[in-house]
Amino acid sequence: MGKIENFRHNSIRFEFDNGNSIDAIFGYGTYSDNYDIPSTIEEPLKGFYTFRESTTIESMFNCSEKLKKSIEKKYGEQPLNRISIEDWMDIAYKIKEEIKPTN
């Protein structure tokens, strides 16, 4: 059975039945489009709620070496940065649907 995990602020990790996994991290302190929004004296926690405005994410994944090479050839090495939601969904689907050889 797959599972969903929130492993840090502004993040989510999906683990699939085939053993593969992918995460999405966004907002302050990540390789997303609003990674560098600093806190201010007026808004000391600004960086922790700016994720609501993010249009891209940072992501890492776990899958077979063959699929990993294919994904990294198209999107760059991990951690993937500034990945659009549409591209992330495509990557996540490939990782979820990967059929691994049985021994």
Image: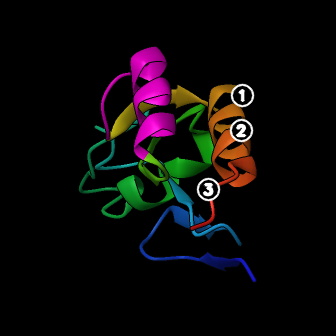
Query: Which disc is residue 89 wearing?
Result: 2
Q: Position of residue 6 (x, y in %)?
A: 54, 76
Q: Do tag 2 and tag 1 residues touch (Cβ < 8 Å)?
A: yes
Q: Give the residue type at disc 3.
A: Pro
Q: 78 or 44: nearer the eye?
A: 78
- The reply, left or right, for residue 7 in relation to residue 16 is left
Packing grade of label 2 (10 A; few <14, some 14-19, many >=20) is few
Query: How far apart, in angstroms, are the residues tagged by discs 2 and 1?
Result: 5 Å
Q: Position of residue 14 (x, y in %)?
A: 62, 66
Query: How far apart, in angstroms, are the residues tagged by discs 3 and 1?
Result: 28 Å
Query: Which disc is residue 101 wearing?
Result: 3
- Give the magenta range: 65-78
Q: Residue at x 30, y 62 (%)?
A: 44
Q: Which residue is mark 1?
A: 86
Asked if 49 appears above or below 84 in the picture, the reply is: below
Q: Secondary structure at mark 1?
A: helix
